[in-house]
Image: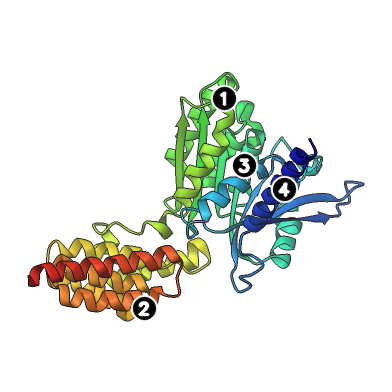
Amino acid sequence: MQILSKNILLILLFTSFISNAASKQEQIEIIHSKFSEPLVFNVILPSGYTKNTSKSYVMMFDLHPKSDTYLRGMHDWMSHNGEWPWLKTIIVTPVAGNKVGGLFDATGKTTPLLNFFDEQLFPLLDNKYRTNGFRIMSGFRENGAIVLSSLINKPNMIDAYIAISPELKNDYVNILSTSSSKLAKLNDKPRFLLFSHGTNVKEEHQMKSYKKLKTILSEAAPEKLDWHYKHYNESYFMSLPLLSVIFGVENIFDDIHNGLSPTSKISQKGVEAIVKHYEYLSKEKYGFTVSPKNALNKLGAHLLTLSKNDGISIFKDMVKRYPNDAYSHHNLASAYARIGDLKKAIKHQEDAVELADKMQTWHKKRHRNFLDEYKNKSHDLEE
């Protein structure tokens, strides 16, 4: 029994070590005149936060005290592979027992809760932590209504909104009655919205309201509001926050990870148009630098199927723009390999291997494997 207890203790210590290595949790307290006790919030810092002191981070806020459990785990998993598909993010939630919800005005006539976020909580977080200015807010049920209220009443506070099964019946928070006119004014900058729900006994009373909100969004949402509607018809109610956050995060950062289609209007205008578009995304949408490399690579691959010279010229331009990027050299090498010029493919892949020497082991092996592949093909042709 004593041996078993020691083993359990070792397992718990090892689990704690893994958890701490992946992320770190702190707490902040804010004094508010309405409450006798401080308002306490959990702040979950992503892996590498302490070590990478020059890096700044996206911030995600959710009002449910239990949301930190699934957000933390999902974020660790979805960001550990090179921040794909979830960029490293600081996650903030209230601790259990936090009475901040007492500031909420359900009539929608005033916004004291949103004012607290905007004037006290978020400025404190920005001052204390290395936030990069891009904020996501997610909420389930009543908290989903608060997310929508934030969009239409405090549109400059948050950049991306995930409203899950929001409470809307009887014009809760005045969302249905005021959103048409307020949404129409939100064309000054890019914003993201995911409105999602399921079909179950807990949402039966909401279906007419959900249909109305979807209609309002279809008719009144401005061009710069990138809104998405997701109906999880076959999913359990308590699964909706997890499913919605995954879908939302993938779409919020899609510009970063996937890049423009090579047949898009912007890509068809050429390299400079793509670069300017990503400068716009960096300044107006995200507030931090977003690379056009994915979009340029897609354009190069597309043009290569139409014209060898046009395709190669794109990849050569990539190497000039990003001379220290292993994958820019690899993509040029790959393009030469595709058109049968293995001599140049080997030359540029050797450059990629040299640059990849400072990258993670997986990338080092990958680039070496490409080089071996090109050399083997060249050797086979010589024989």
The circle on residue 354 is 2
Residue at 64% across / 70% down in the picture?
Answer: 51
State the residue position of label 1: 206
What is the total number of numbered labels drawn onto the structure image? 4
Task: Indicate which disc, 3 or 2, sits on the residue closer to the N terminus.
Answer: 3
State the residue position of label 3: 70
State the residue position of label 4: 10
Mark 3–mark 2 Cα distance, whole angstroms, equals 40 Å
Is the residue marked by circle 4 packed among few (<14), some (14-19), or many (20+) residues within 10 Å? few
Mark 3–mark 4 Cα distance, whole angstroms, equals 25 Å
Residue at 75% across / 62% down in the picture?
Answer: 124
Decide if residue 91 is in sight here: no
Q: Secondary structure at mark 1?
A: helix
- Residue 261: x and y in percent read 29, 56
Task: Indicate which disc, 2 or 4, sits on the residue closer to the N terminus.
Answer: 4
Amino acid type at mark 2: Glu
Q: Mark 3 or 1, which is nearer the eye?
A: 3
- Left or right, residue 60 beside residue 264: right
